[in-house]
Structures are given as structure tokens and as C-alpha cells.
Amino acid sequence: MLEAIVLGAFLGVAIIVTVVALTGKSSDSNRPLSSSEVSGVARAFARAYGHENARALGALLSPDVQRVSAADIQRGRGAVLDAYRSQFRSQVTRGYQLQDLS
């Protein structure tokens, strides 16, 4: 159960990261995102997380990202990356799989 909550939180972070990262590429920050843009960043997040690559995660996160878990909330890129690094040190990640992305 806790694993499902944590994975849901990570997916939520990935979606937030997608919106923030991709809206900055256009002069129109209110433009709709394409499904391939959303899928691409979500997959990049899953790949970075699955390989416990904090540097790659940092490249995807916005400066004001928030990470919400069942036990805590981290605010800001540095705090979020510290939490991921701590998690990676204490637990082995066997993978991060996304399904049904267009």
C-alpha cells in the first residue's frame, strides 16, 4: 500500500516537472502540451529514477518543485534531490515502470 502511494507521488512529481519543463520552451507559456511532450518527460523521469540518477532527476525538476510522500514534503530542487539521494542510499530501486502512455 505504501509503495503504491509513493509511486503515485512520484508520478505526480513527474507530471508537474513535465508541465514546468516544457512550458518554458515556447514563448507562449499557456500553450497546450502535446501528448508526446508529456510522455517524453515522464519517461525521462522514470528512467532517471529507475537508475537512481539524481543528476538526471535534477535536470528535469524545476527550482520550485515539491515532492510529497506519505511521510513528508520537500520544497525546492535541492531539498527534493536530497530526499531522493537519501532514499536511493537506503533502498534499492528495482525499476520504475510507466504504462499506458501515448
Image: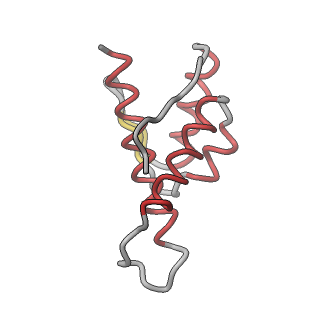
Residue 48 falls in which quadrant of the image? top right
For the point 41% across and 68% down, which residue is it? Answer: 33
- Say how many tags the image has: 0
Residue 94: image location, x then y, percent: 59, 17
For the point 67% across and 45% down, which residue is it? Answer: 56
For the point 43% across and 35% down, which residue is it? Answer: 99
Q: Is residue 32 left or right of residue 56?
A: left
Residue 80: image location, x then y, percent: 51, 40
Q: Quadrant of the N terminus?
A: top left
- Of 28 and 101, nearer the camera is 101
Whether 42 is drawn above or below 6: the answer is below
Residue 78: image location, x then y, percent: 57, 45
Whether 61 is drawn above or below 81: the answer is below
* Picture colour scheme: secondary structure
Q: Is residue 39 left or right of residue 70?
A: right
- Of 79 and 33, nearer the camera is 33
Residue 55: image location, x then y, percent: 70, 43
Residue 71 falls in which quadrant of the image? top left
For the point 42% across and 39% down, which residue is it? Answer: 74
